[in-house]
Amino acid sequence: MSHLLGIETLSTEAIWDYLQLAKSFAAAPPARELAGQRILLLFYEASTRTRASFEVAARRLGAETVFVAAQASSIEKGESLLDTVYTLRALDLRAIVMRHGSSGAPGLVARNVDVPVVNAGDGMHEHPTQALLDGYTILRHRGQIAGLTVAIVGDILHSRVARSNILLLTRLGAKVRLCGPRTLLPPELAAAYGEAVTATHDLEAALEGADVVMVLRIQMERMRDAFFPSETEYVRAFSLTPERLRLAAPQALVMHPGPMIRGVEISAEVADSPQSVIREQVENGVLIRMAVLHRLLAPRAA
Ligand code: CP
């Protein structure tokens, strides 16, 4: 049984395979090869982009989707994760796409079901399809990832997007600079990833000559303590403004996984600038998620 639980457990060949497959789907949309298959979208946390793009991707391949959110389902009455999955499995599901607030929850489900499981974001752990679509977006604009310098700025500590991107980008030969307040970027975090990853608390230093700037939202929902003095202080030190963006390489790409909070981690001017590929990231998410569903399910198609 194949699953997509994280970039960490994906081979470099498999990463390239997903990226190439997404490119081929952009050139020629595939047939409705998953017609008659039913995919569960099980979301214990809020989502706009990931949920909608998995739904579009599944339908473009001919599959039907069943969406279950923690809110307004029997999960609210206390039904356990595995009981929920076993119950829904009885509806002839061929795959489970799931988002959960606990790191490792998709892995737990994968060990207990007989259908492929796709991690659509688990706690502070991984968001593999986000990293794949980000890598695909960079490739479309730069033609390669090896040799690029990517600055990832913001709440690194709580970000599954940062973790998956660090793993994918360094595997494909990029250098990654992490930047954020000390509380959101502990020194040991960068050290865990080896020499290709550096850390700084100085935004200007992080941006200097960077080919790609990836901005992250502050994940207030994962914070129990105050990690910085005030929003005003954060904006003053870490918000990506047009003046700061000029420190990066000419025509550096500006990326954000969303949802973005304009005026906090990124100015509206930068978010809407010609260098911003934020909306294109969303479009590319459909292609990547088609590639993932195709690889996991097409061999089982009728
Ligand atoms: N990037 C991302 O995961 O966005 P959503 O939370 O809207 O799915």
Image (spheres, helix red, strand yellow):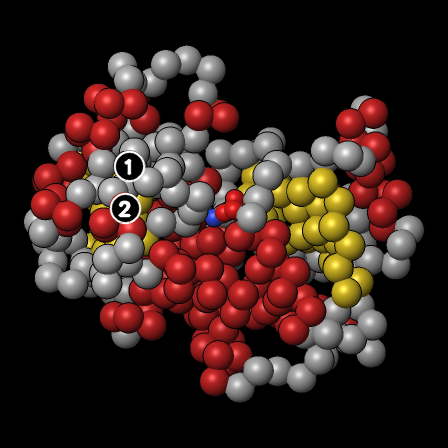
Give the amino acid at mark 1. Answer: Gly
Q: Nearer the viewer, residue 152 or 246?
A: 246
Quadrant for the N terminus in the image: bottom right
Q: Quadrant of residue 275?
A: bottom left
Residue corresponding to mark 2: 268
Q: In this view, does 255 lie to the left or right of 202?
A: right
Give the quadrant of the C terminus. Answer: bottom right
Q: Tell me which corner region of the image, top left, top right, bottom left or bottom right, holds residue 238.
A: top left
Q: Where residue 236 sits: x, y (%)?
A: 17, 28
Q: Is residue 99 left or right of residue 148?
A: right
In the picture, measured across the screen, residue 69 lies left or right of residue 284, that is right
Q: How crowded is mark 2: few (under 14 residues within 10 Å), some or many (20 or more)?
A: some
Q: How many numbered marks, from 0 up?
A: 2
Residue 251 appearing in the image: yes
SS at mark 2 in the image? helix
Three-letter code for the amino acid on which mark 2 is drawn: Ala
When the figure is inspected, residue 225 is found, relative to residue 28, above or below; the finding is above
Residue 214 picture location, percent across and down: 29, 49
Residue 188 coordinates in the image, percent (x, y): 30, 28
The disc placed on residue 135 is: none
Residue at left offset 39%, top offset 42%: 260
Query: Do the numbered discs 1 and 2 sit on residues whose CB atoms are within 8 Å?
Result: yes
Left or right relative to 52: residue 114: right
Question: Disc 1 to disc 2, how far (Cα)?
Answer: 6 Å
Q: Residue at x 48, y 25 (%)?
A: 222
Question: Residue visible at 45% across and 70% down?
Answer: 19
Structural crowding at the residue carrying mark 1, measured as other residues with C-alpha within 10 Å and reported as few (<14), some (14–19) or many (≥20): some
The residue positioned 24% from the left and 57% from the top of the image is 273
Above or below, 147 against 82 in this view is below
**Which residue is label 1 attached to?**
263
Q: Is mark 1 on a helix, strand or loop?
A: loop
Q: Looking at the picture, how far across and down is residue 141, in whole percent?
A: 28, 70
